[in-house]
Amino acid sequence: MTATHSPNLPEVRDLLAKQEIHEVVLRYCRGIDRLDLDLVRSCYHPDAVDHHTGFDGTVDEYIAWVGPKLELLGGTLHFLGNHLVELFGDVAISEAYATNVHWGHPSRGDFTSGARFVDLMERRDGRWAIAERWAVREWTRSDAGRMTAPEANGPRGARGGGDLLDALRARLHR
């Protein structure tokens, strides 16, 4: 006869917190890639601070800074890899590795960068969000001249509310 393992409530609570934090980072990437700045803003606490290459400031200043930069691009895709979360009660350190593809920039051209999102996360009123973010750039590679036209007709991504994901969500949220 084997003993059954009963989950320890603190362990389950920690797993749920880590999942919630992971989803904050995923929503941030979706918001950037789909040019949904409201979704990006929702990943931060209102008094949050962001540090990116070429930028340091409040979340409102960050949104005002990144929006026009994203609008210049044809698009972006952020791929998350390793993600480690260290919990300290209602505060956590989140480190997520990312490969970020950018295309269609009118003067810089296409490029890919490797980065880590190092976040100080806080749970306030039961909600995990970014209190302070460091987007640590590890490397950048030019992809100029490497993009090609699609091989055939088919679904394509869109930004600013016109993506297939937006249509599907609207259909299910009638």
Image (tube, rainbow, N blue to C red):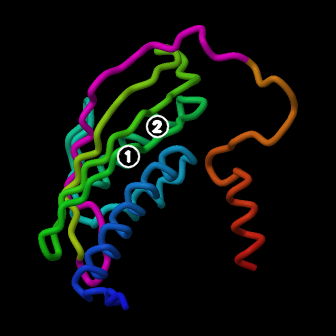
- The front one of 152 and 160 is 152
Tell me, yes or no, whether the highlighted magenta stretch contains residue 98.
Answer: no
Amino acid beneath label 1? Ala
Label 2 neighbourhood size at 10 Å, few (<14), some (14-19), many (20+)? few
Residue 155 pos. (x, y %): 79, 42
**Which image quarter is the C terminus in?**
bottom right
Above or below, 74 relative to 83: above
User: Does 89 sit left or right of 169 as displayed?
Assistant: left
Rendered view: 75 above or below 172: above
Relative depth, front residue between 28 and 63: 28
In depth, the one of 165 and 18 nearer the eye is 18
Q: Which mark is residue 64?
A: 1
Q: Going by the image, does 18 lie left or right of 90?
A: right
Q: Are the residues at dot 1 and dot 2 in contact (C-beta closer than 8 Å)?
A: yes
| Disc ID at residue 68 | 2
State whether the magenta stretch is mostly helix, strand or loop: strand
The amino acid type of the residue labelled 2 equals Pro
Q: Please state the extent of the stretch shown in magenta in the rendering.
A: 124-148
